Amino acid sequence: MLETIALGAQQLADPVIWIALISGSVLGIILGAIPGIGPGVGIVLLLPITYTMDPLAGITLLMGLYAAGWYGGAVPAITINTPGTAVNVLTTYDGYPMAKNGEPQRALALAYSSSFVGGIFAVSVLALAAWPLAALSKYLTSVDLGMAALLAMVLVVVAHRGSEFASFAMLGAGLFVSTIGLETAYGSARYTFGTTWMMAGVPLISMVLGLFALSQALTLIFSDRQIKDANTEIDRRLLSGFIEVFRYPKTLFRSAGLGVGMGVLPGVGEFLAQFFAYTSARAGSKTPEKFGKGAPEGIIASETANNAVPPAALVPLLSLGIPGEAFTALMLTVFIVHGVDPGPTLFEENKAFVAGLYMTLFIMNFVIVALLLVGTKWIAKLATVNDRLLGVIIMCLVMVGTFSSNYRLSDTMIAICFGVLGFALRRANIPMVPMILGLVLGPIMERYFRQGIGAAGGDMTIFVTRPVSLIFLLVILALIAMSARNAIQRVRQ
C-alpha cells in the first residue's frame, strides 16, 4: 500500500496531470449544471484530444469530467427543480422542496457531502478490489474471457427492463458495425462494398460523437424547455452538510455500497443504483412520510449512490479489460491508442499508471468539492443558458472534432448519419448505449473466441468443459430466461 501511495505521488509531480484534473473537474461541473447537456457530451467531444495526451492525463481528464458532472447536476436539481443530468432526477424529489422551504444551502451541502463520501468510498473499493480480481483473472483462458464479454452484453440488455428487445436490436446493430472493415485473423474485407475508406471500419469517434453529441445538439435545438430563474439565494455556508450527513450513517453507507455494487455490474449504471438506494432509504427511515417533501435522507441516498458508480465501473475494466458501460468503453479506446493493455498484466507492467490513477481519483473529489464550495452561486446561473445556443455550439464542435481526428470528410458524414439516427432513437426512447458496447465489445469477444476455439482445435465443447466458462454460460441462460419470463408477464398484464 505504501509503495502504491509513493508511486501515485510521483505521478502527481507532473503538472500536466494537475491541469487535466482541474480542467476536467471544472468542465464537468459546468456541463453537469446545464440541463440537457451532461458529462457524456463533454466526454465524447474531448475523446479525440485525449488520444494525443499521456494515458494517465487523458483518463484523468475524462474521469474528472465524468465524476464532476454528477456533482454539478445537483445544483439545478435543487435550485430550479430541473435535474442537470438524468441521474439527478431523484435529487429533485427532496432537494427542491428543501430549497423552497428556505434551506437551499442545507440541500446543496447535503448533496455535495453525500457525493464526496460516495466517491471516496468507491475509490477505496476500487483500490482494494481491482488488484485481487486481476490476480484471479490470470487463471482465466481466452474462452472464459470471451464468455465474460458475452455476459457483459447480456447484462446490458436485461438491465433495460421493459425495452429488452430494443436493447438487443441496438446491441446487434453495434456488433454488426464492429465487423465492418478488415478482420484481423486473415485480413479479409467485410462489408466494405469495394470502398477503400471503409477498410479501417467505422470510426468509433464518428459513431460516438454522432450518436451522443450530435443527437443531443439536435434535441436542444428543437427543445421547448422553459428557462426558470432560481428563486433561492445561495451563500457560502455550505460546510454544515459535511457534519449533518454523518447523522444518517445507515443511509449513507448503504447507498454507497449499492452504488459500488451496481457500478461493478455491466449495464446497470447510476440511475438504478440511486433508485434502489432511494427506495431502501425510504423503507428503512423512521419518517418515510417526509420523503418527497424535503427529507435529508432522500438527498443523501440519491447523491451518494450515483457518485459511487463511476470509480466502481473501473473495476471490471482494469482487472478484466472488459468495459461494462458506454463511458468505460470509451476509456478502453484511450488505453488501446496508447498501447496500455487493461487486464491482468496492467498491474504488473504499469504499476505507476495504476497508482497514479488511484491517487488522482482520490484527490479529484476534494478538488470538485472545493470548486463547488467557491463557485455554487455562479454555477447555478448556468441553468438559464439558452438550449438552442448550446445546441449550435455542440454541433459545431462535433463537425470540427470528427474531421480533425483523421482529416477525412467521410468521418464527418458518418457522424452526421449517426447523429440523425441518434436523434430518432432519442425521440423513440430507444437506448443507444448497447450499440456503443456492441461496437467495442464485439472485437474483444471475437478475438477471445477465435483464440479459444483455435487452441481447442475447433472443439466447441470447450465452452462447457471449462468450469468458469460454464458458470458464465449458465448465468447468461438464467438471465435470458428471467428476462423472457418478465416480458411474458408484462404482455399478459
Image: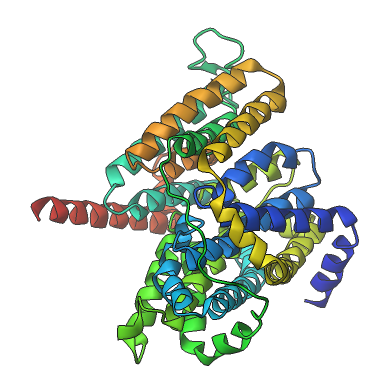
Q: Residue furthest top?
A: 194
What percent of the width, then of the height, locates residue 444? Answer: 55, 40
392 w.r.t. 234: above or below = above
- Image-based side of 367 in relation to 276, left or right: right
311 w.r.t. 158: above or below = below
347 w.r.t. 206: above or below = below
For the C terminus, the image quarter is bottom left
Residue 320 seen by the camera: no
Q: Residue furthest left?
A: 492
What percent of the width, then of the height, locates residue 184? Answer: 60, 27
| Image quarter of residue 400 | top right
Q: Residue at x 73, y 60 (%)?
A: 347
Depth check: give the residue in front, 169 or 46.
Answer: 46
Q: Residue at x 58, y 31 (%)?
A: 395
Residue 251 seen by the camera: yes
Q: Residue at x 65, y 33 (%)?
A: 397
| Image quarter of residue 108 | bottom right
Protein image colouring: rainbow
Depth check: give the residue in front, 489 or 402.
Answer: 402
389 w.r.t. 230: above or below = above
| Image quarter of residue 89 | bottom left
- Image-based side of 233 in relation to 226, left or right: right
What percent of the width, then of the height, locates residue 236? Answer: 68, 76
What percent of the width, then of the height, locates residue 292? Answer: 35, 75
- Image-based side of 192 in relation to 30, left or right: left
